[in-house]
Amino acid sequence: MDPEAEIIRDEIPDVEQIVRDECRLEGERQGHPVDPSDSVIQERVADIILGGAGAEIRHKHDRPLK
């Protein structure tokens, strides 16, 4: 596996946790379960990652490329 793919693979659990958290929070707001494919969830997760969490996740999994 190439190094870039390994880094992305390492970041997936962090992104999945953000999705789970946002589904739970939106479900609490709406009063019923919300699917991860819901546009509200997708937009919120994108905002979170682009708003700084993405850099934090990349830094957390930072390692030199070979």
Image: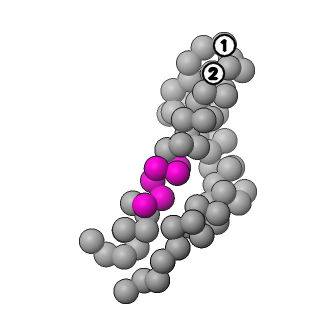
Closer to the camera in the image, 60 or 44: 60
Q: Secondary structure at mark 2?
A: helix
- The residue most toward the bottom is 66
Q: Is residue 8 above or below residue 29?
A: below
Image quadrant in which you'd find residue 19: top right
Is 36 contained in the magenta span? no
Q: Which residues are magenta?
A: 10-15
- Contact between marks 2 and 1 (CB within 8 A): the answer is yes
Quadrant of the image for the C terminus? bottom left
The amino acid at mark 2 is: Gly
Residue pointed to by mark 1: 31
* Rendering coords of residue 45 (x, y %): 62, 45
* Rendering coords of residue 57 (x, y %): 58, 61
Q: Report the residue at 60% width, 35% height from top.
A: 21
Residue pointed to by mark 2: 27
- The residue most toward the top is 31
Quadrant of the image for the N terminus? bottom left
Q: Report the residue at 43% width, 68% height from top.
A: 7
Query: Does the rendering let one see residue 39?
Result: no
